[in-house]
Amino acid sequence: MVEINAIYEGALRCVATHGPSCATLNTDAPKDNMGKGEAFSPTDLVATALGTCMMTIMGIAAQKMNVDLRGATVNVQKEMAATGPRRIGKLSVEFHIPTPLTSEQQEKLRNAAMTCPVHKSMHPDVQMPVSFHFASKA
């Protein structure tokens, strides 16, 4: 179990503390929802969690293959749903992997990314297209 505590500071801002590490992060409501947009919004953190979780699971798979993924990047574009209750409608995920890999290694990394716990925890109504751009094969 991991405990996260948050305190509301007013003006639509919170400070969350990660129990195990005592690391903190600030949130702010986005500009399009009455906030100042001066920090991650809660839904931005969902997008961040998705991208970093997928990359972390790929990193675990890469370590098992003795592959160094340093320099790999992920870009997540969050779009809120246009209709209905305010919610995330789409999270587009794009990976760029600079490490030359074989087709088999690329497939293992693709499969690993798609098994990340955040990806598996998302509501099925959230569209999540994922693309991978790999350097030339080894």
Image (cartoon, helix red, strand yellow):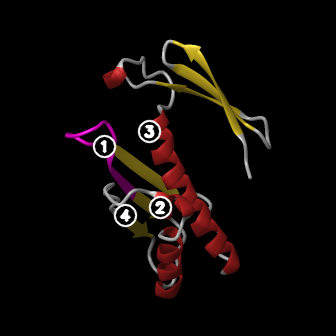
Q: Is mark 3 on a helix, strand or loop?
A: helix
- Structural distance between the alpha carbons of marks 3 and 1: 10 Å
> Residue at coordinates 48% horizontally, 18% vertically from top-left?
12
Q: Name the residue under label 4.
A: 130
* The quadrant where residue 80 appears: top left
Q: Which of marks 4 and 3 is nearer the N terminus?
A: 3
- Structural distance between the alpha carbons of marks 4 and 2: 11 Å
Q: Which label is found at residue 92?
A: none
Residue range in magenta is: 79-93
**Is 84 positioned to the left or the right of 12 in the image?**
left
Three-letter amino acid code of the residue under disc 4: Val
Q: Nearer the viewer, mark 4 or mark 1?
A: 1
Q: Which of marks 3 and 1 is nearer the N terminus?
A: 3
Q: Earlier in the sequence, mark 4 or mark 2?
A: 2
Dot 1 crowding, Cα within 10 Å, few <14, some 14–19, many 20+: some
Is residue 80 one of those drawn in magenta?
yes
Measured as percent of width and height from the top left, residue 18 is found at 72, 38
Three-letter amino acid code of the residue under disc 3: Thr
Q: Which label is found at residue 119?
A: 2
In the image, 33 versus 65, the foreground residue is 33
Q: Do the residues labelled 1 and 2 touch (CB within 8 Å)?
A: no
Q: Mark 3 points at which residue?
A: 43
Q: Which label is found at residue 79?
A: 1
Is residue 51 one of those drawn in magenta?
no
**Count of all numbered marks drawn on residues in the image:** 4
- Say if residue 80 shows up in the picture: yes
Three-letter amino acid code of the residue under disc 1: Glu
- Structural distance between the alpha carbons of marks 4 and 1: 14 Å
Dot 4 crowding, Cα within 10 Å, few <14, some 14–19, many 20+: some
Q: Is mark 1 on a helix, strand or loop?
A: strand
In the image, 54 versus 82, the foreground residue is 82
> Residue at coordinates 53% horizontally, 80% vertically from top-left?
108
